[in-house]
Image (cartoon, helix red, strand yellow):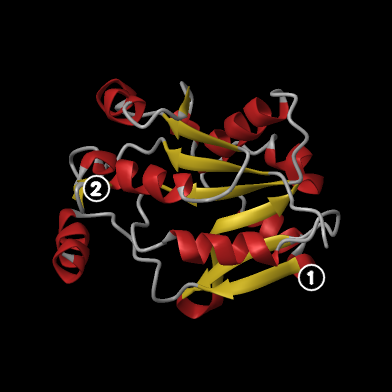
Amino acid sequence: MSQKPNIAILVLAAGSSSRMGSPKQLLKWKHTTLIGHAIETVKQLDTLKAVVVLGANHDKIKPVVEQHKIEILVNEHWKSGLGNSIALGINSISASNINLDGVLIILADQPLIDSSYLNMLLKSFEIGKQQIIASVYNEHKLGVPVLFDKFYFEELSQLNDDKGAKGILQKYTNRVISVDAKELVSDIDTLEDYERLYNANH
């Protein structure tokens, strides 16, 4: 029987929701909020460690996240973009002295991504194969949720722009295993986006 991999989860929630006008992390979803729903989804997974990265509006969001008893990182440089938040999270989990095989990166504003989908990514992962298991959606775009082998931690820890890990996905495209997430990934950038998605799922 193959060894179970040790995976950490990084929940990215540092953005300012500039087009929304208020922190979208705190928008209502099911019986909680978008950020609360993401954390509850993560807690259903059998993983070693989970961390939430906050940034903009962290003073408002942190009290909500603290109720879920999960490790919180505050990115003071969140304006540098998604890549900077990924780097902060990777550097933190790398310093935790846990022997990890990989990291699963998810966003707080993809509420249709459920634990069964994330478990499918985890079950596709094989230790030591330098895999990247990425979600594929609109027009064959690759993105989050994405699971990186620890081989990529060094490069992930040096990201510092708003493209997230796209450059790494492009650089190692021959190693990427893509998983269809077309029905599960919906952008929530405006209040109209949110209301459309909320009304369709409540």
Q: Amino acid at mark 2?
A: Arg
What residue is drawn where x is 72% and y is 29%? 94
Relative placement, left or right, of 85 versus 38 is right
Does residue 163 show up? Answer: no
Q: Residues within 10 Å of mark 1 (few under 14, many from 20)?
A: few
Instruction: Tell me the residue that label 1 is attached to.
Output: 174
CA distance for labels 2 and 1: 35 Å
Which of 22 and 200 lies nearest the eye of the viewer? 200
Q: Is residue 174 above or below residue 60?
A: below
Q: Residues within 10 Å of mark 2 (few under 14, many from 20)?
A: few
Which of 189 and 134 lies nearest the eye of the viewer? 134
Relative placement, left or right, of 179 versus 81 is right
What residue is drawn where x is 27% and y is 42%? 18
Which of 166 and 196 lies nearest the eye of the viewer? 196
Which of 1 and 185 lies nearest the eye of the viewer? 1
Provide the secondary structure element on which disc 2 rests: loop
Quarter placement of the C terminus = bottom left
- Give the image location of residue 26, x and y in percent: 23, 39
Relative placement, left or right, of 90 versus 85 is right
Q: Amino acid at mark 1?
A: Asn
Q: Is residue 155 above or below residue 202?
A: above
Q: Residue furthest right?
A: 128
Choose mark 2 or mark 1, whichever is in front.
1
**Which disc is residue 19 wearing?**
2
- Give the image location of residue 132, x and y in percent: 71, 60
